[in-house]
Amino acid sequence: MTAGRAFLIIIVAAICTFATRAFPFVVFGGKKELSPAVRFLGSCLPSAIIATLVIYCLRGITFTPSGLLNAGIQLLSVGIVTVLHLWKHNILLSIGGGTVCYMVLLRVVPNWMH
């Protein structure tokens, strides 16, 4: 791939990203009252998205002897995310803390087992 083609791809991606970010402000901007359907979606979708992500992340858990260690690491990390979020109400801290916990446990615990 040439440098010009890569630059063109980056420009198109930037324009598309800007357009998708600006779209809600263009459509719903100003002093217009939001429809009840949009308000309902705004209240229920965040919880539905989080539930979907949790299910997606934990879909591969197996409670067999060979998968029990990994299942414990995953469930402990989910618990850390939950506790951090209930304690500080900071999404970045919760997700970051859970990710760091998972990565550290994934690297450290199997070495303790050998």
Image: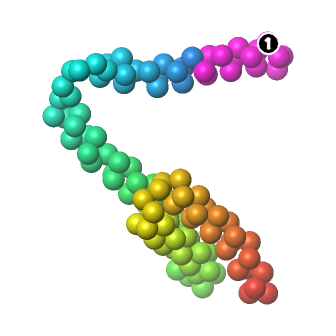
Q: Residue at x 23, y 33 (%)?
A: 38
Which residue is denoted by mark 1 in the rendering?
Answer: 4
Was residue 2 drawn as part of the magenta stretch in this picture? yes
Was residue 68 drawn as part of the magenta stretch in this picture? no
56 on left or right of 9: left
Query: Looking at the picture, does residue 99 appear above or below residue 63?
Result: above
Which range is magenta? 1-14
> Residue most toward the left?
36
Residue 108 position by quadrant = bottom right
Q: Is residue 82 visible?
A: no
Residue 65 position by quadrant = bottom right
36 on left or right of 89: left
Q: Amino acid at mark 1?
A: Gly
Q: Which residue is at the front of the view, 113 or 21? A: 21
Question: The residue tagged with tag 1: helix, strand or loop?
Answer: helix
Q: Which residue is at the front of the view, 111 or 101? A: 101
Q: Residue at x 37, y 22 (%)?
A: 25
Q: Residue at x 26, y 40 (%)?
A: 41
Query: Looking at the picture, does residue 69 appear above or below residue 9?
Result: below
- Counting from the top left corner in percent of width and height, residue 43 is at 26, 45
Q: Which residue is at the front of the view, 88 or 41? A: 88
Count residues near mark 1 (Cα–Cα under 10 Å), then give few for <14, some for 14-19, many for 20+.
Answer: few
Q: Is residue 86 visible?
A: yes
- Total number of numbered discs in the rendering: 1
Q: Which residue is at the front of the view, 41 or 114? A: 41
Q: Residue at x 67, y 74 (%)?
A: 105
24 on left or right of 102: left
- Counting from the top left corner in percent of width and height, residue 61 is at 53, 70
Which quarter of the figure is the C terminus placed in?
Answer: bottom right
Which quarter of the figure is the N terminus placed in?
Answer: top right
Query: Looking at the picture, does residue 85 appear above or below residue 3?
Result: below
Magenta region, main secondary structure: helix
